[in-house]
Image (tube, rainbow, N blue to C red):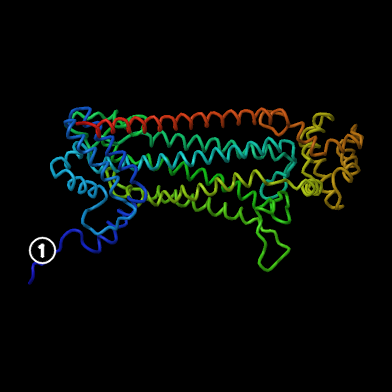
Amino acid sequence: MTDPKSADTSRFPDPVYKETVLRPLFDGAKTHHIDGFRRIDRAHLVMLAETAILPRDVAGRIARALVSIDAEVDPASLTYKGEVEDFFFLIERELKARLGPDDAGRLHTARSRNDIDHTLFKLSLKARLDGALEQARGLLEALIATAEREQATLIVAYTHGQPAQPTTLGHYLSAVIEVLIRDIERLEAARGVVNLSSMGAAAITTSGFAVDRARVAQLLGFAAPQRNSYSCIAAVDYITASYSALELTFLHLGRFIQDLQFWTAFEVGQIYVPNALVQISSIMPQKRNPVPIEHMRHLSSQTVGRARVMLDIMHNTPFTDMNDSEGESQEAGYQAFDSAGRVLRLLAAFVTQMQVEGARVAQNIRRSCITITELADTLVRREGLSFRAAHEIAAHVARAVVAAGSDLPTGGYAPFREGFTTATGKAPALTEAEFRHIVSPEYFVSVRNRFGGPAPEPLAEALAEYRARLAGFADQAAAHARAEAEAADLLAQSFQSLVEAA
């Protein structure tokens, strides 16, 4: 019987393993992480020289070799053939070709693929979060501008799919705005988790070398090093925080988008979509299909699903460095940011251009008797009735109006007088003109001037606050951008000093 071990004369990598694992990982790295690898190599080398872990002349030779590799090796053109395990070892091989094995091997002093990988992924994720935050601010600006423009524009508010009360588009959009503000805060909080460097953790426990972790974090544009070294390579909450925040953002936006779908239905007709955002049926020439809403809805769902995938991948994994959180999982997550960006841009454009169908809204308000609540409220305030008694009179009015196929302003006063007299034994003090005014949607909105209501004063206060929050987010983004630019300049200058070292 042949010993399987003696019969196994193959060399690493196994051809199937190469094609199913190593090649996809290599292709992913050269697509998504080249700049991150370059920055990490340079920042680590600067730190090794500054701490005298490496002699400056050796660090200079390595720096010049890295410049040579950048100039002579085009990652996009590379085809993985299995000569090296991954992109990390490709760079080391190129260094050996230029420096020899001794100097080439010194760059890896006091680091590991473990801390390199997580730092690499954080760099990529932070950039994507910054992009998503920029697009979310763009949507927030569009929502606020539209809400300001439509502060007084009446719409029908629905509950359980049925007309409920009149409000304004500005008031409705303010509710969406508040959720988006909280979602942006969650994305910013996730960015704070991402913005901690793993470099210096090495494999697990840092290093016996006197590394300066804070200096590497500074050169790479991180706020600080992540404190616990085990956490650097095991705690993937920078991933779960980011994708949880992204998932919630698009779960919430999907609900708003679903309302837009409902409001543009022919039978509702509350929102008019301009021709630029309408597709015509290929066979039914009368149809105006607001297809962008469908795309926003399904892309939001795709974003939620892709973000959820990242959380599911992390579920019940060991609390250690593991491949589950690395290359191919990271690439899967990037797709969530891709679809997220498409929704945010399209929704901002849509919100800016959509219009309220005022005539249809007025018709739906009249037909649905949705101002009847204010009649009951007024009876409590003016006639001294209990709310339950007033509610029963109002319900009688609504039933009579609907049965007659009429509406409150033109057909409601007679059943009101009848219902009021039957319930109280006396005639109401309200005149027909007062009745018409009370059941108008304009009056309904105007008397709801409590904090958070749709009346002009509280709504204007809310919109001013939203503007201030947007300005605060913009300031925060500018501070992030300055910090990243300053770190990039500092790294470039520090590395160049090594290139020029004798």
Q: How many residues crowd mark 1 within 10 Å: few (<14), some (14–19), many (20+)?
A: few
- Quarter holding the C terminus is top left
Name the residue rendered at 82%, 48% in the picture. 399
Question: In the image, 79: left or right of 239?
Answer: left
**Quarter of the image where the N terminus is located:** bottom left
Left or right: residue 434 versus residue 222 is: right
In the image, residue 255 lies at what x, y percent?
Answer: 59, 47
The local secondary structure at tag 1 comes to: helix
Left or right placement of residue 119 versus residue 414 in this view: left
Observer-nearest of 57 and 129 = 57
Residue 145 percent coordinates (x, y): 65, 37
Identified at 68% across, 31% down, the residue is 459
Residue 372: x and y, percent?
79, 41
- Frontmost residue, 285 versus 364: 285
Q: Amino acid at mark 1?
A: Lys
Q: Quadrant of residue 228?
A: top left
Please determine whether, in this image, residue 283 is positioned above or below residue 393: below
